[in-house]
Amino acid sequence: MGSLLGDWPSYDPHNFSQLRPSDPSNPSKMSPATYHPTHNRTFPPPDQVITTGGKNILLRNFYERAEEKLRQKRAASEHVMPEHGCKQARVSTS
Amino acid sequence: MSVWNYVVTAHKPTNVTHSCVGNFTSPQELNLIVAKCTRIEINLLTPQGLQPMLDVPIYGRIATLELFRPHGEAQDFLFIATERYKFCVLQWDAESSELITRAMGDVSDRIGRPTDNGQIGIIDPDCRLIGLHLYDGLFKVIPFDNKGQLKEAFNIRLEELQVLDIKFLYGCSKPTIVVLYQDNKDARHVKTYEVALKDKDFIEGPWSQNNLDNGADLLIPVPPPFCGVLIIGEETIVYCSANVFRAIPIRPSITKAYGRVDADGSRYLLGDHAGLLHLLVITHEKEKVTGLKIELLGETSVASTISYLDNAFVFIGSSYGDSQLVKLNLQPDAKGSYVEVLDRFVNLGPIADFCVVDLERQGQGQVVTCSGAYKDGSLRIVRNGIGINEQASVELQGIKGMWSLRSLTDDPFDTFLVVSFISETRILAMNIEDELEETEIEGFCSQVQTLFCHCAVFNQLVQVTSSSVRLVSSTTRELRQEWNAPSGFSINVATANATQVLLATGGGHLVYLEIGDGTLTQAKHAQLECEISCLDINPIGENPSCSQLAAVGMWTDISVRIFSLPDLNLITKEPLGGEIIPRSVLLCSFEGISYLLCALGDGHLLNFQLNLSTGELKDRKKVSLGTQPITLRTFSSKNTTHVFAASDRPTVIYSSNKKLLYSNVNLKEVSHMCPFNSAAFPDSLAIAKEGELSIGTIDDIQKLHIRSIPLGEQARRICHQEQSRTFAICSLKTHSNAEESEMNFIRLLDDQTFEFISTYPLDTFEYGCSILSCSFSDDSNVYYCVGTAYVLPEENEPTKGRILVFIVEDGKLQLIAEKETKGAVYSLNAFNGKLLAAINQKIQLYKWMLRDDGTHELQSECGHHGHILALYVQTRGDFIVVGDLMKSISLLIYKHEEGAIEERARDYNANWMSAVEILDDDIYLGAENNFNLFTVRKNSEGATDEERGPS
């Protein structure tokens, strides 16, 4: 047990070193000051006002698929074009 | 009738829901940040302990609180999300001491079913994204760019619908979440997903684990070098990662909170539903997990959050009891506990019920609440009270009087504190190191008791002893003039201000002296017919250093008299009545009104309004502050003058809206008090109590003061009975042994000591639902009526209950009558000398009938159906206002001639009610389960009943 309990991590060894235990029947009454922002930095920079992307998951999926198809088509057509040209060229030569 | 109602919160929230520790206010400082419902509190860790820095109100109930450190930042940022789907990222600017909003936004979706198990908000340990689980089946991602800026959020479909917990895994090249969920066969599993930020989708993660503990409810991600996750169940704890699986059995418990101890993730604190604190240890070899160990450390409040602070100190945040600062000791104490509670932070919540009573009979109502839950249940007495925050104290026995003195007449600060004892006078002063040390004023006589001291004009000090009045220079500290009492006479009481001294010697001699520059002149003498007990010449007129009036309290004829100054003519004589002599009189002024306060030897205080020009007294009022003699002193706090009444129940007297108010001070017994406003202790008070002299600052006047009566069980209903001076509560005791068992009781408590004086156990499965103190027509006795319900596990709604009628005899609860009901008795009200009960969907009226054998019984008279569940009932005259489970408020009327209850009006909105109250004949106040208050008005002008419905 001792080995499990020992060696507690310490960030600053001074922390809590002078703690005066309070009367258990008399709880801590220290209350912090209430923060009242009086500056204009309560608003973040305009690009840091975050919203959720308008597209819902289904639409995003449709667009992605459509894009993917288009890309495949494009890739295919790019692949095809020179062949086609070649064909034409061949046709023209024949 | 006013159209608007004004609502103000009397006390800030105290329920701690979240906490976290990090370097928030500076890269070197360690902070504890605590969320209390709608506020966050920022504390600093110091050698002296937790130092509260700021209390920050947030517009919303806090659902998530996390500290994180974006890349390249020296200190942590705070992420807060609210229950209404707003979030913000805050940063502390240490230079300007300001909170800056780095980012904020709305993370709500227009469509979506809010999660049943609460909102989850997590931040990737490598700060690549913030993950939110707010709606079933959706995981929202707010990505960070490589500069740490947040980007537009998006949703990912999450297949698991019943999610119990989600955490980010450490040490993953792609952000990876681990999801604990329940399937449609109620089995629980974990699964991992990689978040593909570019594709905005999940990719199946590196591992999963099926068929966990049925009570698995909490995930703890383990940081490097081990990584992986701990899955906390009710009977097992499992460590799980891609290639290691370790499990240990535990004593059955529900883990409510955890706190990581070591940065390498080898030890964790776990807090369970019974408030037991365990240490969970990951044993390892060569950075590989070999097993788990769990050890019981001790007991705390039932934790809702645990934060390891520093050097073995831990913060336990609680929703059910007081939050605590605890220390983990290396050696167990006598009870085998390694946990030592060093500080408590009050939590009033959850408040299940309350009553308002004037316990001290001061005309000042106090709220007695049923607070806390389970073993942390308590009664709390909440009243306007004032706290003294002790700054320094020293042991000193036998203090007979205290006065503070300045070294120069116009010095803003006090230098000397004169402390008088039975046979000596000691003088304390602030030295250069701001410490109080003993000093001397050569001109003072220090071998005798001092009766009074004051600062006088021309940089002089006045000391009155039993033999003389001494005028001393405050700069040279030497005696300038002395007035000696005539031989054979000794001074009994004395008072002074800057220019005047009034004293009384034996034989009823009243002597008036005037202070000049080095002179003390006897200006007037009068002989009264009896001895003088107390005096005051506090200047409250136009001249702040000279009084036109003197107040004198008398022995023998028990009166208080007003004399004019300087001629000592009697203006007013006010007999006090009774046989108790006045012990302290004070002339004072609050909000432009002059008063004479007169404190008696038995703890009573009389106050009169004083006409300064005529010296007339009027508007006599008497209150009881304590049982011991009172000493009155003025002091000022925030530029307003108040009066401190030192006694066995120290009280501060202040004025609000031109009314005198009395506020308890959180000290047991104070014999003397004097203001001590030094540079080191500004606006402080020196207080003599129980062999101790302490210096402290005073709280804001009007702050609520809370006293706690721990019950060790949960009080659910409370009611006060003036006649027997008792409280009765319905309470619930949970035994957290192997078999969870509950016992329900009706307990009788003394309203002064709050001790249990009698107990009536309820049956098994029987719960106390309502309690009332009332009397019935044709019976002069006062009874406690208790409504109960039999809550059987197989029933959806109770179908059986009882109404029990008790009388308090010799401090015991005696059951007088009992009536079985067909459901839960949710509410009881005294109504036209009868008993009105709300039983499930019905309102039922009972008569109190005398049987032939002289005993009484409850007899059903009439009722009213038509509610879903009639939970809350209030009555006024013949009107009955019912708060329904989900049908808002309805208004019923009892018709005497017909002996029937009929509905008169209702609010047709669907509000799930949590309380109702009648504000006046026409306006009713309701509270509903979405934390809203609303009022409805009876439309009395309508021609027909339909039109008279609420608007």
Image (tube, rainbow, N blue to C red):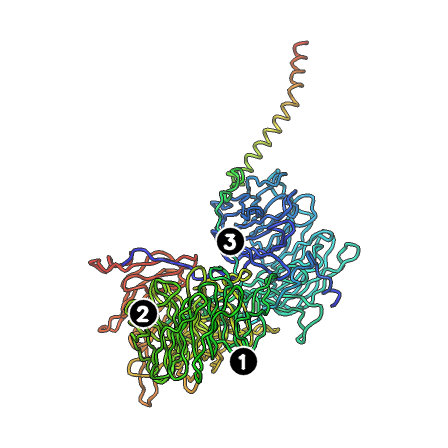
* Side (left or right) of B489 relative to B140: left
Q: Do the residues labelled 3 and 1 touch (CB within 8 Å)?
A: no
Of labels 1 and 2, earlier in sequence is 1
| Letter of the chain that mark 3 sits on in the rendering | B
The amino acid type found where label 3 is placed reads Val
Residue B243 at x, y = what percent? 74, 52
Front residue of A45/B536: it is B536
Is residue B43 at least partly visible in the picture?
Answer: yes
Q: In the image, are marks 2 and 3 on the same chain?
A: yes
| Letter of the chain that mark 1 sits on in the rendering | B
The amino acid type found where label 1 is placed reads Ser
The amino acid type found where label 2 is placed reads Leu
Q: Quadrant of residue B786?
A: bottom left
Is residue B320 at least partly visible in the picture?
Answer: no
Q: Mark 2 points at which residue?
A: B610
| Quadrant the C terminus of chain B occupies | bottom left
- Of badges 2 and 3, nearer the viewer stands 2
| Letter of the chain that mark 2 sits on in the rendering | B
Q: How crowded is mark 3: few (under 14 residues within 10 Å), some or many (20 or more)?
A: some
* Side (left or right) of B217 relative to B865: right
Q: Mark 3 points at which residue?
A: B56
Q: Mark 1 points at which residue?
A: B423
| Quadrant the N terminus of chain B occupies | bottom left
Q: Distance between the residues labelled 1 and 2?
A: 37 Å
- Of badges 1 and 2, nearer the viewer stands 1
Of labels 3 and 1, earlier in sequence is 3
Front residue of A4/B665: it is B665
